[in-house]
Amino acid sequence: MYFRADYTELVGMRLRRLRQARGCSQQQTVDRVRQPRGGKYSSALLSRIEQGYANPPIYVYIHLAEVFEVAPERLLGAEDLQQPISEAEMTVIRFLRSAGIAPHDALAGLAGR
């Protein structure tokens, strides 16, 4: 029997939004995550998490947050910490990270300083 709570529904909804924003299927998502001892998670587990019917160990959430390139607290934190990030914004973030540019330096450059 699965247990569904407000918290599990909220985290599941966040995961689903992140996955869908990137155009990934559940199977594509779990194919990118590895269990600590090897192997991969099932798409059924991700489905239950997204529906709010699973509350796996914290490391599962951390692995999923890494796949989506978000901090675990964005996935698990309080609702008032959540701000939607569009795919375009994520593209900018990925570029800044790969170029080794700190966000404040990028903003200073845009401001002409």
Image (cartoon, rainbow, N blue to C red):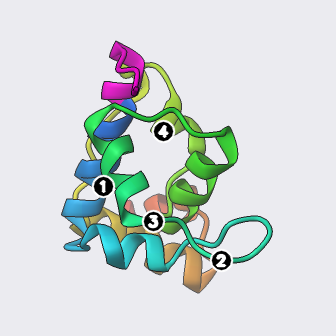
Query: In the image, 100: left or right of 55?
Result: right
Q: Which badge, 3 or 1, is on the more N-terminal residue? A: 1
* Marking on residue 42: 3
* Marking on residue 74: 4
Binning the other alpha carbons within 10 Å of mark 1 as few (below 14), some (14 to 19) or many (20 upward) gives many
Whole-percent x, y for residue 111 in the image: 38, 60
Whole-percent x, y for residue 55 in the image: 51, 32
Residue at the spot of label 2: 39
Whole-percent x, y for residue 57 in the image: 66, 39
From the viewer's perspective, is the residue at label 3 or at label 4 nearer? 3
Real-space Cα distance between discs 3 and 4? 23 Å
Kind of residue at disc 4:
Arg
- In magenta segment, residue 3: yes
Residue at the spot of label 1: 18
Q: Which residues are magenta?
A: 1-10
Q: Residue at x 35, y 65 (%)?
A: 90
Query: Which secondary structure lies at badge 2?
Result: loop
Query: Which secondary structure lies at badge 4?
Result: helix
Q: Which badge, 2 or 1, is on the more N-terminal residue? A: 1
Q: Residue at x 53, y 65 (%)?
A: 41
